[in-house]
Amino acid sequence: MPFEVADHDGVLTLTLDTPGSPINIFNHATAHQLIDILSQVSAATTRAIVFETAKANSFINGVGLLLAHASQNVDDIVRASTPPWNAYRAVRDAPVPTIAVVQGSCFGCGVEFALNCDYRIASDSYETQFYMTELSDYLFIPLFGSTWNLPEAVGLGAAVDLLLWGEHWRAPQACEHGLIDAVAPHECLADHRHRFVEHVLDATQPSRRRGRVQWGPDEDRVIERTRRRIEALPPPYQKVYTDALHLLAAGARQTRTFVAHQKDELQRSAESALSVIGKAAYGFFYVRQMASERAAGRARAALEPTTLCVDSDGTPDFAKFATDLRRRRLPGVNRADAAAADYRLVAAKDSAADSSNGHAAPAADGRGHTVPIRLRLTLGPQAGLELYVPTYSAGGRLVELAQRIGGEPGLSREEVARLTRLLHRLDFEVAVTTPTEMFVSNRLLVGFLTPLVRFIELEGDARVINGALRGAGFVQRPHDLLAVLDRRLVADQLAVNFGGAAQIEPLLEALEDAECRDGKGATLVVDALCIALVDAVLRTRTEVRDVSIVDLIARELLDFPRHLSSMCSWLKRGRVAQAVAGDPRVRALVSDAAFESARAFAAGTREFYR
Amino acid sequence: MPDRAAVLTKVRRALVNVLEDEDKDIEVRPESHLVEDLGFDSVNVASLTIALEDEFDDVLLLNDWIASAHSPSDLTVDSLVDYLVGLLAEPS
């Protein structure tokens, strides 16, 4: 059963542990069990209900993406969401105080579940974070009451930041905003929980719920600012974001009943989930999971206790990285000195000549592994294995774990899987590759930037590029990407496709400074991107185990549009054939080799995914 | 056209592989519903996709199969086999 039930002196503790899953999912079995338990609760015998997790890294992460994905009409969505909704209502209407003790990720419906409890406390561990996945990842509106409950808990502005703009809040930030009532150091969560429950029982724990938002000029400004930001989004996304804003505003004003609001929320949620872009956006969930499972093995495998040493020596970037990692304290991951650590993370050296001490080989005593990390743009791995975090300085979470073909001996597959699990828990997205010349991330970067820079060189108007990308669904502009990369090194990378690095600098500058304009040439830009990216993916065929890994990089690094599902599923032969046979000027925007490889792909019989 | 019985055998093997990994001992029948009978959710659909890729030695996505279902109860072992038979019949 998903919940383990314990009763201590009238305090009912329900501990969620979704069987066979690395994360807790609020599926139908969970909902039915909870409804059954709560139907038997009486204030005569029970004083409080505490919800906990048996999984240190997950409170509640999901409810039923599969059910929404396989639904074709509003009735299906209503039917699929009824059991969890009834369970959430049962929590909300429980006759005794309810307390959520959050540790690990609390995503989407996990936040919604916690908001239906009277009180929430959270562990101050790095893995404890609050994030609304629905719009940010899957372009649909959540349906379990958050558009009413969030403004009540955190106010309209913070609710917009969390729901629409995908902010991740760790426990202290969540507490600051009012999403939770208290933060507890992870090591003494049990003590804090005990004291908190005592305060609830003796009625000395005040509720932080604010109730209806007192609407004023601040709220008007939030609405105005958010509308402007929505207008800058790609057109296909604007309706769902506008609907979500409408619901949050209505939830804040509370001029109708909760039930009437919920009916509206469910209707709009169902419409967004059933829309073409919603259906496509779900698809990336599976791609991400596949890339993750290819790297980490079956995710069920728990992380073994691990010791880690992060050197501080190196560039200022690396020192910051080392400090950040030390702060990400994880249960089961302990620090050790270099000689005793399972993994010693060091700054990668900058030249091949320096790589002698930079490969992922066992340490002299055979205990641990030294793993070089590269945080800035660079051509390719010089050691047998490197971790490459290309956009770390901008908060990027993508790590390319690159084991160079023909390089120094790296880690075995089992060791790579173990390191990947560690990196996952440190909140990185991991792409495992075996690059030949350059990191796979850089190959995609070159594929992405080459036609854009070439367009500026030949057509002159960089603003059209931003208009074209926005039209295609990119939220991030090249400006954002270029801002976190070393421009000189980007120029070096692109030089092979141009006369030389010096010629590229002013073109990159134009690309970085460009405003956004829709105009002639947008189709040409997107067709050229299509050709260049197909070529880039084809060049990685021997460098990744599965194209889902390339898709993961494209999403994390290039912000590949959500509504197109994934890059490799967008790059269908028909789409590529259209690009190749379209405007003849496209040939000038890509290399001859890229054009020929795209043409051959279009004429072939294989898609990247069947 | 691929042999349907052979595809069914591989699909069952992939399903059993995923279920065993989750310590679930459930009989997989052609008429079994993935959600109601086998307890599948979005996370283990990704595991199933990988298990199928390994069985068929091909890169697959089940998105279209899921998205084309008339309702979640249409996601049966039989419907998955039909979908894969159609997919594998396309030239490679």
Image (cartoon, coloured by chain):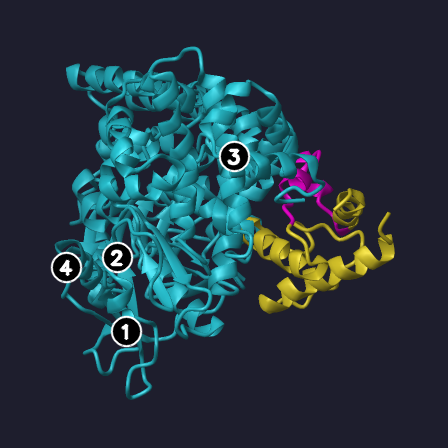
Chain colours: A cyan, B yellow
> What residue is disc 3 on?
A592
- Asked if residue A151 lies left or right of residue A175, the reply is right
- Chain at numbered mark 1: A
Badge 2 marks a residue whose secondary structure is: loop
Tell me which amino acid carries mark 2. Answer: Tyr
Task: Point out the stretch of residues depicted in magenta.
Answer: B60-77
A66 lies above or below B21? above
The residues tagged by marks 3 and 1 sit, at their Cα atoms, a distance apart of: 37 Å
- Nearer the N terminus, badge 3 or badge 2? 2
The residues tagged by marks 4 and 3 sit, at their Cα atoms, a distance apart of: 42 Å
Front in this rendered view, residue A8 or A236? A236
- Chain at numbered mark 2: A
* Residue A344 x, y percent position in the rendering: 26, 72
Residue B69 on the magenta segment = yes
- Chain at numbered mark 4: A
Q: Are marks 2 and 1 in contact (CB under 8 Å)?
A: no
- Nearer the N terminus, badge 4 or badge 2? 2
- Chain at numbered mark 3: A
The residues tagged by marks 3 and 2 sit, at their Cα atoms, a distance apart of: 48 Å
Tell me which amino acid carries mark 1. Answer: Ser
